[in-house]
């Protein structure tokens, strides 16, 4: 049964250590385990999938991982329990406003907006995004 703080918006920086051996992360592994056990619900948006896949592609090009790593990462990513939430035109207008108020990229502002909209925790390792979240009272996953 899901409890308080069970909705968590996860950005790419938080989840990528699962797929990159040189960035192992116990918090990301714990988060995935909790999602698999239905203790939490991971929220994302369509952008999340493209960001993760792009980082895998970049890591492959840089020689950090090989084809087999990409394939196993894709297998893991495809079974990662998550709810993908579409964004409306109204959401995009609000995201744009966040980019201006917090000087964030559109990508980062979209994660922040989703956490605000869904009253969810935000899981990120991005320092600028963490600072922006704190400034507008979005609770970060500790």
Image: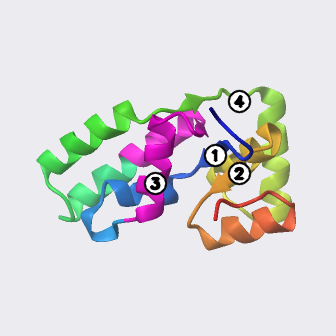
Label 4, label 3: how many angstroms apart (C-alpha)? 28 Å
Label 2, label 1: how many angstroms apart (C-alpha)? 6 Å
Asked which quadrant contains residue 139, the reply is: bottom right
Determine whether, in the image, residue 43 is placed left or right of residue 82: right
Q: Residue at x 63, y 73 (%)?
A: 127
Instruction: Assess whether mark 4 and mark 1 are in contact (beta carbons under 8 angstroms).
Output: no
Label 1, label 3: how many angstroms apart (C-alpha)? 15 Å
Badge 3 marks a residue whose secondary structure is helix
Mark nearer the N terminus (1 vs 3): 1
Asked which quadrant contains residue 136, the reply is: bottom right
Are there few (<14), some (14-19), or many (20+) residues within 10 Å of tag 1?
A: many
Where does label 2 land, which residue? 121
Instruction: Assess whether mark 3 and mark 2 are in contact (beta carbons under 8 angstroms).
Output: no
Instruction: Assess whether mark 1 and mark 2 are in contact (beta carbons under 8 angstroms).
Output: yes
Q: Residue at x 29, y 60 (%)?
A: 20
Asked which quadrant contains residue 73, the reply is: top left
Mark nearer the N terminus (2 vs 1): 1
Residue 66 on image: x %, y %: 14, 54
Residue 16 on image: x %, y %: 40, 56
Are there few (<14), some (14-19), or many (20+) residues within 10 Å of tag 3?
A: few
Q: Residue at x 28, y 59 (%)?
A: 59
Where does label 3 land, which residue? 30
Determine whether, in the image, residue 24 is placed left or right of residue 131: left
Label 2, label 3: how many angstroms apart (C-alpha)? 15 Å
Where does label 1 land, which residue? 9
Where does label 4 land, which residue? 87
Mark nearer the N terminus (1 vs 4): 1
């Amino acid at each position: 049964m899901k409890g308080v703080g069970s909705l968590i918006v996860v950005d790419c920086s938080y989840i990528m250590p699962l797929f990159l051996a040189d960035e192992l992360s116990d918090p990301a592994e714990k988060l995935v385990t909790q999602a698999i056990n239905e203790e939490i619900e991971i929220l994302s948006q369509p952008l999340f999938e493209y960001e993760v896949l792009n980082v895998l592609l970049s890591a492959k090009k840089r020689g950090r991982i090989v084809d087999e790593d990409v394939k196993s990462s894709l297998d893991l990513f495809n079974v990662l329990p998550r709810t993908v939430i579409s964004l409306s035109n109204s959401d995009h207008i609000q995201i744009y406003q966040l980019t201006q108020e917090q000087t964030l990229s559109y990508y980062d502002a979209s994660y922040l907006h989703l956490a605000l909209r869904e009253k969810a925790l935000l899981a990120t390792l991005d320092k600028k995004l963490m600072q922006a979240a704190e400034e507008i009272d979005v609770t970060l996953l500790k």
